[in-house]
Image (tube, rainbow, N blue to C red):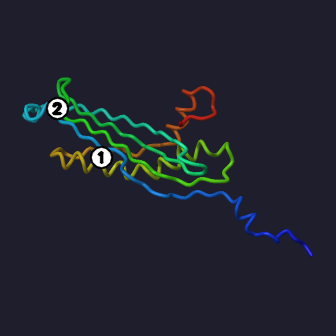
Amino acid sequence: MSDSNANPSASAASEPVFQIQRVYLKELSLEQPNSPAILLEQQQPAVDIKLNVETAQVVEGIFEVIVTATVQTLINEKTVFLVEARQAGIFEIRHVPDDQMGPILGIACPQIVYPYLRGNVADTIQRAGFPPVHLTEINFQAMYQQQLEAAGNGEKAVA
């Protein structure tokens, strides 16, 4: 009699786990420092958008991934509005090989969090009385590769 299936819970315990625990808006700010005068300007504002991804281990097997967007519009170097939003997700990730953790945290998790961030940014800008700024789709794999190259060590691009 073979005992290869004698303890099925032991094999299940080592199976890879990837679960979304929660996605939430961690921080949101809107500034209109030059209102109302800037609102009377007739020029089209220049739009500057910056994105960032951060990860942190909360406890063993639980990770927080934060995608930050900063959207600033300027007319003649004066700010029309500035929005900063930090959308976060808590993920349970267990029994995944170390070489796969970077891509999961730097690509897969941000891809899940980003659509929520896009919606919150567009909604906030529109509620502030401006035409919505829609963040474009992001290739998080390319962004992750750029971070790896910038880090130069090829180990961990997102920290």
Q: What residue type is labelled 1?
A: Val
- Give whichever of discs 1 and 2 has the lower sequence position: 2
**Residue beneath the point at 67% across and 44% down:** 98
Label 1 residue SS: helix
Task: Return the residue nearer the eye: 7 or 153.
Answer: 7
Relative to 125, 140 lies left or right: right
Relative to 123, 39 lies left or right: left
Task: Return the residue nearer the eye: 62 or 117.
Answer: 62
Q: Which quarter of the picture shows residue 83?
A: top left
Q: Against 73, is 62 above or below? A: below
Q: Quadrant of the N terminus?
A: bottom right
**Viewer-nearest of discs 1 and 2:** 2
Q: Residues within 10 Å of mark 2 (few under 14, many from 20)?
A: few
Q: Residue 140: horizontal and vertical position, in percent? A: 49, 42
Residue at mark 2: 33
Q: Residue 57: horizontal and vertical position, in percent? A: 55, 44
Q: Point out which mark residue 121 bears.
A: 1
Q: Give the Cα separation between the discs numbered 1 and 2.
A: 18 Å
Task: Return the residue nearer the eye: 107 or 98.
Answer: 98
- Do the CB atoms of the residues marked 1 and 2 lie less than 8 Å apart? no
